[in-house]
Amino acid sequence: MGPEPMHSVAMTAKIPSHIPPELVVEFDRFLSPELKRCPHERVTALVHGSPDIFYTTGDRGHWVVGRATVARDMLRQPDKFSSDPKYNIANARNPPTLPNQCDPPLHTDLRRIINPFFSPAGVQKMEQQVRQLAGELIDEVALLGKCEFVQVIAQRFPVELFMRMADAPLDHREMLVAKVDRFTRAPDIQERLAALEELGTYLKGLIAQRERTPGDDLVSLAVHGKVAGRGLTDDEKLGMVTLLFLGGLDTVAAMLSFIMAYLGQNPSQYQRLVGDPPLIGNAIEELMRVHGVAGMERGVTTDMVYNGVEFKTGDRLVFLPHIYGLDDQVVDAPFHVDFDRPISSHLVFGSGPHRCVGSHLARLEMRVFIEEWVRRIPAFSVDAQSDLPTRGGLVWSPVAVPLVWPRAVAAAPHAIGAAA
Ligand code: HEM
């Protein structure tokens, strides 16, 4: 498949009168052809050739913040660039997902409820079960000499771990993954909202159960949390639990799939990890930098000129952490993947008060998974037949990552750090 033409997305929304034509660039975060293969390279090329903040008519019209330094600055000013959907009507949900669709001080209180579960210490307690599940899933495929990574592993490993944390029935996994996928990637907003409503209907049942019979799981923690001395409203409970499922069921699966596709295409890089497993922690950080997956939105709270751009109250802003780690204004040779690069502060998990609560868990899952893969499969590659199709949306993801390895090389796991 040859490169598709750039800038071929149909205009879908009217351009508000305060937006000058030189700031308009066609980019649809669900449909642009750049998202269908190598999205990090191709969207970066599009964005770097555009103004730092540009306007697009895609997905019902919004600004796009293209550069990392500007994004970081804006994300740290929730008073000007709010997460409250009243300033971003196009992103309204009923009820709002929480804590991402509110601002401090409510946001601070809601984060306090779930922070301990996701703290480095809280997450560290899970390492043993993370390692065990990773090992079991890899053992299932090791002797086959191949697997389609997205479906067979990525949509099981972090998802099953999350469902255990939430104490949700594992046989609901496929149904839930499908709903989250529709919400995250269906180009039509009505379909996205319908998927969210279906997810909500399911989660209401889980919430009611935990209200009656609390456990030590994540849903119980959210449902019985308190803000300013009061219990959460029904909408707040649903908003909190919904966002946890959206975060837990999709993001790590998408990023780990990108990372495995990269390692399968770059055997010498993979061999460095096989020969030096303690390098894996740093390598994951570098691989995350170049494979951001999740975006976010804000709404402008007041008429203003920021960074030379005129904004009106209620203007919608879309951020692209997917590519901020590839910004040549902040990273030297950004497309050079260097496992020895000092860890930089990429924006893959966002910035400011809403910075991802699940970041320590995500890191742990990906590091442990690669450690276990290295212990069992000392060489592998992407099937040469595949051109690695990808999809855009709220979270970018590979569609399929077919991996192959000579069956003879799949080994019984050796101790981490032992010679490969
Ligand atoms: C590689 C994996 C992940 C990536 C790239 C990622 C990315 C992000 C980003 C960019 C934000 C900021 C949203 C904003 O500013 O509006 C965020 C927030 C959030 N993430 Fe993650 N995430 C990941 C994994 C997870 C996991 C595993 C969970 C939970 C199980 C999770 C739960 C959340 C929650 C609850 C928020 C909202 C935080 C707030 O508004 O204060 N994420 N994530």
Image (cartoon, grey):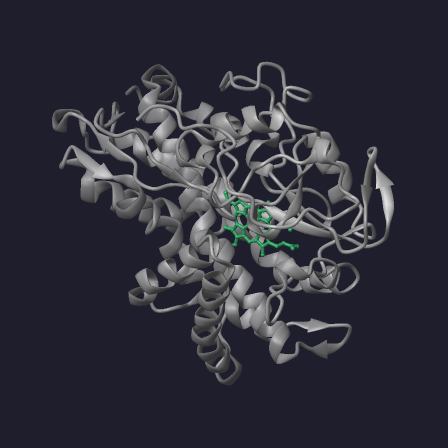
In the image shown, does 272 or 391 lie closer to the viewer?
Answer: 391
Most extreme residue toward the bottom is 212
Q: Confirm whether residue 414 shows in the render.
A: no
**Where, quadrant-wise, is the C terminus in this rendering?**
top left
Q: Is residue 29 above or below residue 99?
A: above
> Which residue is at 74% across, 51% downward?
315
> Which residue is at 42% across, 29% downward?
38
In the image shown, does 107 or 295 lie closer to the viewer?
Answer: 295
The spot of residue 61 in percent (x, y) is 63, 49
Q: Confirm whether residue 201 shows in the render.
A: yes
Left or right of residue 21, residue 158 in this image: left
> Which residue is at 63% across, 67% downward?
96
**Where, quadrant-wise, is the N terminus in this rendering?**
top left
The spot of residue 284 in percent (x, y) is 48, 30
Tag count in the figure?
Answer: 0
Q: Is residue 178 above or below residue 324?
A: below
The spot of residue 310 in percent (x, y) is 82, 41
Left or right of residue 56, residue 304 in this image: right
Q: Is residue 318 above or below residue 289?
A: below
In the image shown, does 233 or 315 lie closer to the viewer?
Answer: 315
Left or right of residue 378, residue 219 in this image: right
Left or right of residue 146, residue 9 in this image: right
To which quarter of the image does residue 228 belong? bottom right
To which quarter of the image does residue 63 belong? top right
The spot of residue 191 in percent (x, y) is 45, 63
> Which residue is at 44% across, 39% downward?
255
